Image: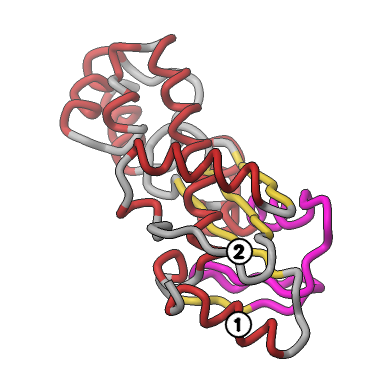
Amino acid sequence: MDDLYLYEKELINKGITLIAGVDEVGRGPLVGPVVTAAVILPINYRLEGLTDSKKLSEKKRDKFYDIIMRDAISVSIGMKDAKIIDEINIYAATKLAMIDAINGLSVKPEHVLIDAMPLDIDIPTTSIIKGDAKSLSIAAASVIAKVTRDRMMYEMDKKYPMYHYKKNKGYPTKEHLDAINKYGIISGYRLTYGPVKDYLEKNK
């Protein structure tokens, strides 16, 4: 647990107390938005078992989501849809969504810890490779972003069950690609992504 708080501790020792963790989910899927979250946790916050959302079961993520939403000083979501992703590319869209999440916080952070990506903003930042497994604040943001996006995919699954979004979350699984070939492309797909582009080429 202490290992997950090293970056935060270092900042707290310098008198910095409003620390936001930022992470994203959804860079790889063929459909739906890229979703980011910014989370400011209370000082010396502890949440046993919290880590990178990809390493947690869905049940645990849902449980941590509720706890973080209850305990955090501030939580904010940013997202960019397929249209923006196609226009400016996923990397640039993710950065914009992260900035939206930071700007949406009810309290301005004094320092931002980001999973991997460098951001050019007017707040000091630290980019940490695999940050969601090294910083509690980023791990919290990864859970909020993941649960938020998964729930959006579940809503899409209710409307379009034939694409199996509940299972694949929009990622290019064989079942998902087969469904695209059978039922075509609906609104919300990223038209610049390989498998979607290929389908559109073939079906001109």
Task: State the CA–CA distance, disc 2 to disc 1.
Answer: 13 Å
Q: Quadrant of residue 175?
A: top left
- Residue density around tag 1, few if under 14, some if 14–19, many if 20 or more, within 10 Å: some
Q: Which mark is residue 21?
A: 2
Rendered image coloring scheme: secondary structure
In front of the other: 147 or 123? 147
x and y percentages locating residue 58 in the rendered image:
34, 38
x and y percentages locating residue 166 in the rendered image:
33, 24
Please report the bounds of the magenta region as a residue range. Answer: 96-125
Q: Which mark is residue 161?
A: none
If the image is split into quadrants, where does the C terminus sit? Answer: top left
Closer to the observer: label 2 or label 1? 1
If the image is split into quadrants, where does the N terminus sit? Answer: bottom left
- Residue density around tag 2, few if under 14, some if 14–19, many if 20 or more, within 10 Å: many
Would residue 54 be found to the left or right of residue 17 on screen?
Answer: left
Q: Residue at x 54, y 69 (%)?
A: 117
In front of the other: 70 or 184? 70
Q: Residue at x 44, y 49 (%)?
A: 27
The residue tagged 1 is 9
